[in-house]
Image: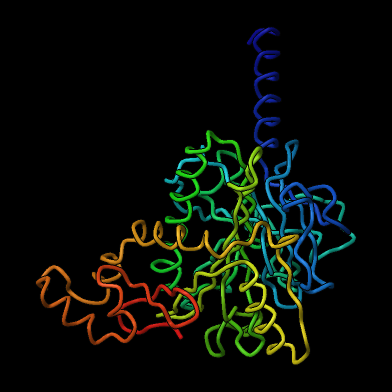
Amino acid sequence: MTQEQLHTMFVLGLFTCIVLRAFSAQAKVVESFDDCKGFFYKDNEPEGMDQNAKKICQKLEYDHYYYATLYSVHRRIPLYSAYVFDSECSSTAGRKENWHIEPQISQPESQTDYMVSERDSDENIIKKHQAISSDYSDSGYDLGLLNPNSFQCDEGRIATFTLTNAAPIDESFDRIQWKNWESALRSFLRSKLDSHNGSATVYIVTGTVPDDDVQMPHKGTSEDPERVTVPSHIWTAVCYKHHLNDTKSFSFGYIGENQLEGGIWLMTVSDLNDKLSSLYSEQLKSHQSIKIFVGDCFDDSKELNEVKGVFNKLINPNQVDEMATDVQTMSLTQKRVRRSHHGCCCLCYYYYWCWNGYQWVYCVETRCAK
């Protein structure tokens, strides 16, 4: 082999190392969100959350930040992830099992300020202060991404597959109800942005309500049980800020029960603040006041009617039907009879939307969320 060939092989090898290193996932545990404040409406993070939780600016090495996460160390789950919606991203991302962990959470003195592959880490050190993927094995819970990978593009998707962005979500709820709402939200926002020629920024915060009475893995299924707190609820708040015309700006939110047939509530951001404040106050046995967006981001209940109507059309209730009953063998008349016995859902003939006297609720056929 000539000297020139050896030189060429060296250069190619060096280039390969640089490329592989460039795509390693990285995050930065920070004292404040100043480095990644752009993911929050008006650069302000939500108020009223655990002040002892770790703040993480999620990024790829040698690249920019992709989203921000507030992570509860003693519960080993994120309290929320904040991100900006990109309508150009493909919705067919699929799942990935190459999970990452954050060394600085388990070892604060670590100089490694980027995510590393979980399989290349010492799990006995890592699991002291954060979840590991085996905690979820045969648990009945999915590794639920708060910042969905389908809401990110290209390398940004790699950054979503970190255990600091994942919480235990009931398998059925995650794969049916929550998946349907994520898909509907994406379609709605993409259509809205197209109608405004992209002249808007969509700030989204997706979070959890920890239930300190429920942990996983369950006793008898693991040598190290009850390490990870299971949320009682999962929620999302949306702030749509038009760049030129504030009359076209709006916000809304929804919250779902993290259980097999959990209902999902659609509401204004101010109502979501109240709901979260109530749930946190009940859990922590002291008054809590949650504020997601500054000024509630153009909180206007009239806009909620449009959102409800659009979600009605986008969410496919037949997908839920097929998993609950053999819809294909039912006639339209049979559907009418069945739904007429389904509490408030008899008010919404084609869709599982219920008006409970306070707000519109989306629910599966076998129960209506209260």
Q: Nearer the viewer, residue 112 or 239?
A: 239
Q: Position of residue 205 (x, y in %)?
A: 64, 60
Judged left or right of residue 57, residue 111 is right
Query: Which residue is found at the position 54% from the left and 51% from the top?
Result: 149
Q: Is residue 75 left or right of residue 215?
A: right
| Residue at 60% across, 36% down | 199
Name the spot of residue 54 as percent of width and height, x first.
Answer: 80, 65
Q: Is residue 196 above or below residue 325?
A: above
Residue 103 picture quarter: bottom right
Q: Is residue 329 left or right of residue 146?
A: left
* Viewer can see residue 140: yes
Residue 355 x, y percent position in the rendering? 41, 78
Of the pair 125 and 7, the residue shown nearer to us: 125
**Residue 228 in sight here:** no
Q: Residue at coordinates 67% horizontally, 65% vertically from top-left? A: 80
Q: Is residue 15 left or right of residue 338?
A: right
Residue at image coords 79%, 70% = 53
- What count of labels does the image hold? 0
Q: Nearer the viewer, residue 329 or 65?
A: 329
Give how far across and how far down residue 250 sits, in percent.
Answer: 59, 54
* Colouring convention used in this rendered image of the protein: rainbow
Above or below for 135 versus 145: below
**Camera-nearest residue between 131 and 238:** 238
Q: Quadrant of the N terminus?
A: top right
Q: In the rendered view, tell whether residue 143 sits above or below residue 16.
A: below
Q: Which of the 4 image quadrants contains residue 235?
A: bottom right
Question: On screen, 184 above or below 271?
Answer: above
